[in-house]
């Protein structure tokens, strides 16, 4: 992969995350500049395809927030010098416009995908931009579908495109830094990943556990921007979010190891022991959580992804974590993960001697739209840095593995931390 100059970026989506991407770009200096911006109805460019300035980014945000929908096109062209608006009514037209915009600069373009479109819609866009320098996304949908995930992964590898997937798996917990290293390094046995990667649920458990009333807890979490919807179905939506993340983690592990589609484990027992909530209604979840705390447990929504020689298995459900478990505590507003190998697990860094049971690796971090945007921009900067190196094609498409192959300090330090924790 040779050095890239004059790297530009295209931004897909102007929701909460997309707006924060533009806002941060208007305030910070990066090694790339955004040359086009797409929302659900139009794509904005400048004459002769020159990048938007920081002032232009500020004006796009202002117009998006203030101008009425029917007047936005006129306002963009009026207030942003040289701005051109390309409207579209369907996904095929959008893809066609993007393809034309990138036809001469594909290998020097980074895509920042902040959309929330459906799996097949987003797959159509992603597939048609493979071959770009890097595709950094927060859209979970195609990666949660094994077939689409596998197709995109293979295409990214074939065309040497770096995949920035951190924001699909729980922002700021670096699962797509940890998971690829362990998945590639595992020689035998298995590794269990436990994940509490829904910050909304973790906020809820912390608040009701401290004695706050359920209604007030939901209201405060919603006001902080952590809930997709308010009301009786608020937590059900968050269960779906964590389920998507578990599917993605299992899919990526399976694709990396060349295994069959992951298997979802579902309990068939009619006897619930230990108890789980009768529904995902906030009042019922709070009751279940508080009763478990009285027994010295920490009830939570937990994902499990087990990677072994035959392929990943995964499940998501409410369970009681035992006292002393690294995830058995409050993580208000944060996501958290824990990885632990089985006794018979062997890694590329393992010696021949039998080892003691591993203490495991735990890590947590905050999420939210601001941090998601920052993470996308960080992934873009890393991709530019990696593009200046000569890397073997076997490294692609996972950036952290490219960083390891290149001897980058931060990747080596992380691998050593994992080796120490899991040895």
Image (cartoon, grey):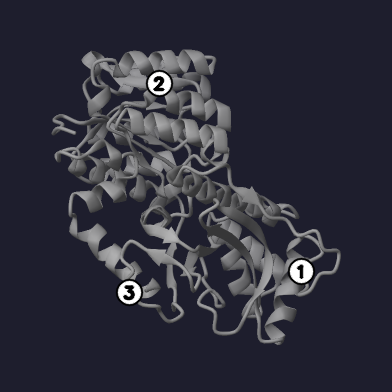
Q: Name the residue under label 3.
A: 420
Number of residues whose C-alpha sits closer than 10 Å to that of mark 1, classed few (under 14), some (14–19) or many (20 or more):
some
Closer to the camera: disc 2 or disc 3? 3
**From this viewpoint, is residue 13 visible?**
no
Cβ atoms under marks 1 and 3 closer than 8 Å: no
N-terminal of the pair, mark 2 or mark 3, is 2
Task: Quadrant for residue 147, please give it.
Answer: top right
Residue 184 place in picture, x, y as percent: 38, 53
Cβ atoms under marks 1 and 2 closer than 8 Å: no
Residue 380 place in picture, x, y as percent: 28, 41
Q: Mark 1 points at which residue?
A: 276
- 343 lies above or below 183: below
Q: Distance between the residues labelled 2 and 3?
A: 48 Å
N-terminal of the pair, mark 1 or mark 2, is 2
Residue lying at 37% horizontally and 32% vertically, measured from the top left: 156
Task: Quadrant for residue 407, please give it.
Answer: bottom left
Q: Mark 2 points at which residue?
A: 43
Q: How far apart are marks 1 and 3 (CA)?
A: 35 Å
Determine whether the residue tagged by mark 2 lies in a helix, strand or loop. strand
């Amino acid at each position: 992969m040779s050095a890239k100059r004059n790297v530009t970026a295209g931004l897909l989506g102007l929701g909460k995350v997309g707006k924060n991407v533009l806002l941060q770009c208007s305030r910070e200096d990066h090694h790339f500049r955004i040359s086009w911006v797409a929302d659900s109805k139009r794509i904005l460019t400048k004459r002769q395809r020159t990048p938007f300035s920081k002032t232009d980014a500020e004006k796009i945000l202002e117009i998006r927030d203030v101008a009425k929908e029917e007047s936005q096109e006129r306002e963009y062209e009026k207030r942003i010098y040289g701005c051109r608006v390309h409207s579209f009514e369907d996904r095929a037209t959008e893809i066609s416009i993007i393809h034309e915009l990138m036809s001469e600069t594909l290998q020097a373009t980074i895509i920042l995908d902040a959309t929330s479109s459906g799996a097949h819609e987003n797959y159509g866009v992603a597939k048609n931009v493979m071959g770009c320098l890097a595709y950094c996304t927060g859209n979970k949908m195609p990666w949660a579908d094994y077939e689409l995930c596998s197709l995109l992964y293979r295409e990214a590898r074939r065309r040497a495109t770096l995949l920035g997937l951190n924001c699909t798996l729980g922002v700021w917990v670096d699962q797509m830094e940890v998971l690829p290293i362990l998945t590639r390094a595992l020689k035998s046995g298995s590794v269990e990943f436990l994940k509490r990667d829904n910050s909304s649920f973790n906020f809820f458990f912390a608040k009701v556990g401290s004695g706050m009333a359920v209604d007030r807890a939901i209201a405060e979490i919603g006001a902080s921007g952590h809930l997709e919807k308010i009301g009786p179905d608020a937590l059900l939506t968050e269960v779906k979010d964590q389920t998507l993340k578990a599917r993605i983690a299992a899919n990526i592990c399976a694709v990396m190891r060349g295994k069959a589609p992951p298997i979802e484990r579902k309990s068939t027992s009619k006897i619930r022991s230990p108890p789980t909530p009768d529904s995902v209604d906030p009042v019922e979840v709070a009751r279940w959580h508080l009763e478990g705390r009285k027994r010295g447990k920490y009830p939570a929504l937990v994902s499990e992804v087990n990677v072994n020689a035959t392929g990943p298995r995964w499940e998501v459900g409410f369970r009681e974590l035992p006292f002393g478990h690294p995830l058995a505590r409050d993580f208000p507003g944060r996501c958290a993960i824990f990885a632990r190998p089985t006794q018979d697990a062997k890694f590329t860094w393992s010696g021949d001697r039998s080892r003691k049971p591993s203490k495991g690796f735990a890590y947590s971090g905050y999420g939210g739209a601001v941090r998601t945007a920052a993470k996308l921009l960080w992934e873009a900067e890393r991709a530019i840095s990696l593009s200046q190196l000569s890397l073997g094609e076997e490294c692609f498409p996972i950036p952290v593995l490219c960083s390891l192959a290149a001897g980058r300090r931060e990747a080596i330090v992380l691998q050593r931390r994992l080796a120490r924790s899991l040895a």
